[in-house]
Amino acid sequence: MSFNNLDTLYRQVIMDHYKNPRNKGNIEGDVLTVDMNNPTCGDRIQLQMLVEDGIVKDAKFDGEGCSISMASASMMTQTIKGKEVTDALKLSKQFSNMMLGEELDTGDLDFGDIEALQGVAKFPARIKCATLPWKAMEKGVHDDNE
């Protein structure tokens, strides 16, 4: 597949997650809740996670922002659901590396649609948009373990 076709496909995936977000909403009950924002561009996210026995049983988000941040939140929640917290943190580390322009080393982890965000690395001002939901997830699971 040519670079232009791949770029077009990735843009379509990002816009699909932006226009039809997965896991947008709230989880009822006692759950981890993290509020974060990116003051640079106004992205705001509230991430909720139900973590039991070291596994992310459910993850939902609410918020507002650019297409990159909202698509990233949609992709991230979709990807971490059902995963062990340690694997979710590994995914986050790999995602951060990808945002720094490094090759994506998926190993045995399933990245799903997340690879569509690879092109964001070419736009340094947008990296914080893409990583906002991931930073919220990291904060939530780290605060839960304290």
Image (tube, rainbow, N blue to C red):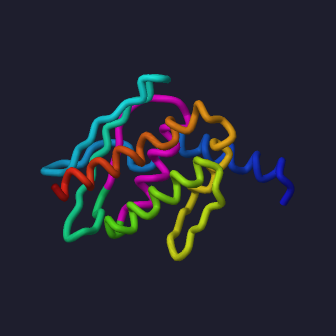
Looking at the image, the residue that sits furthest to the left is 30
**60 left or right of 103?**
left
Percent x, y for residue 41? 49, 23
Q: Quadrant of the C terminus?
A: bottom left
**146 left or right of 139?**
left
Q: Which region is colored magenta?
A: 59-81
* Residue at screen point 27% across, 43% down: 26
* Residue at screen point 28% across, 68% down: 55
Asked whether 94 falls inside the magenta stretch, the response is no
Q: Looking at the image, is 131 positioned above or below residue 78?
A: above
* Residue at screen point 41% across, 44% down: 133
Q: Quadrant of the N terminus?
A: bottom right
**123 left or right of 38?**
right
Percent x, y for residue 34? 26, 41
* Residue at screen point 76% across, 46% down: 8
Percent x, y for residue 47? 31, 44
Q: Nearer the viewer, residue 135 or 18?
A: 135
**37 left or right of 53?**
right
